[in-house]
Amino acid sequence: MDRNAPGAPLRAALAEATEDRLVLDLAGITGNHRALRRELPGVAVRFAMKACPVDEVVSALARQGAGADAASPNEIAQAIAAGVPVADIHYGNTIKSDHNIAEAYRLGVRDFATDSVEDVTAVAAHAPGARVFCRLATSGHGALWGLTRKYGCAVPEAVRVLDTAREAGLTPAGLSVHVGSQQMTTEAWHDAVDLLAEAITALKRRGIRPDHVNLGGGLPALGYLDRRGRPLEPPLDKMFAVLREGMQRLREVAGHPLRFVLEPGRHLVADHGAIRAHVARLAARRQPDGERRHWLYLSCGKFNGLYEMDAVQYPLVFPTHRGAKTVPAVVAGPTCDSDDAYDAEYGLVAVPEDVASGDPVWLLACGAYATSYTTTGFNGFDPLPYTVIGGEG
């Protein structure tokens, strides 16, 4: 069986759709959450809301006990409205203004990520008595999106930050890492555990005993293709094994009870969302080098549902042209922007040669970031509406 084939409920919903839309399968998403909890028992899940800020998704996960990793007061308010207990929400963004901190505190949040003395000083001023966890910088090696430079600090700086927090009347509660989004290697998790062990040891020398470790996001989805159209095959089972072993090691290094938190986003939702789009045009143009190349223009692209198309390919299904003769084509969105396309050098996709304007196309593995990484109407192309299926999951 093709692992990229949509499940029956999702396939039925795509087939029934007569207009462009994103379809999210709650049963698949909540099933992923249950599987994750089985693999990592006892770990508290905080859904990274930025991956899919859809009320129905947040509510379904909350009913299963998942909290929220929020990056702004608006996300915090949305999580609360969706049924997430405020005690299970943390402000996971290390970048926040004084106003943001005060508003999050007003909403009831008491756990804040940090990575600088300046930020922790602001938290002390506007969220007195709060708990903070310090994000350590990682290399991001092995991830499709490395998340380096903008976030995190070195171990000695983390000690300074948490020492400052203690002196300012805050609780230096924990440490966090993020190995990069769509992490493809187990080595990154090994390195993260080493980094955390070093930090815990350094904090012990200062008399600081964190009560939890946040292992961040990074767990991959399974349905993407790489830029050349080859299946991505992250060793997910081995990643879980490394995490289980790493948590045991960190408990031993700490020498006291240590809780663990995880912030999955795309891992939960990506493979259980798909877009029903349509063909704008299949065209062939001769390039300046004399090569004749096909281009498939779709009704959605980088600015209305497929923001990550510069790093991955979303598998395409042409439901009215199964088994048809194909031509290799560059896939592009509808806007007048050169970034709105798959890699034109390597990212050729097999496209039925007889597709016509208006034919339906299904784009798979679109559950992550299709609703959040979108414009309000760049070039006049509307954001995609969404439909949720799967009920209680």
Image: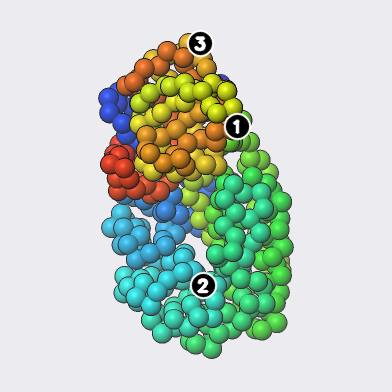
Q: Nearer the viewer, mark 2 or mark 3?
A: 3
Three-letter amino acid code of the residue under disc 1? Tyr
What is the spatial separation of the Cα atoms under label 2 and label 3, in whole angstroms?
55 Å
Mark 2 touching mark 3, by CB under 8 A?
A: no
Q: Earlier in the sequence, mark 1 or mark 3?
A: 3
Identify whether 347 is placed above or below 323.
below
Mark 1 and mark 3: Cα distance apart in space: 21 Å
Category of crowding for the residue at label 3, using alpha-carbon neighbours closer than 10 angstroms: few (below 14), some (14–19), many (at least 20):
few
Where residue 243 appears, x then y in whole percent?
A: 65, 53
Instruction: Please state which of residues 59 and 65 is positioned toward the viewer in this rendering.
Output: 59
Quarter-of-image position of residue 19: top left
Residue 325: which numbered mark, if any?
3
- Colour scheme: rainbow
Q: Residue 337: give x, y in percent of width and height.
A: 41, 41
Residue 114 badge: 2
Answer with the quarter of the image where residue 105 lies. bottom left
Residue at numbered disc 1: 346
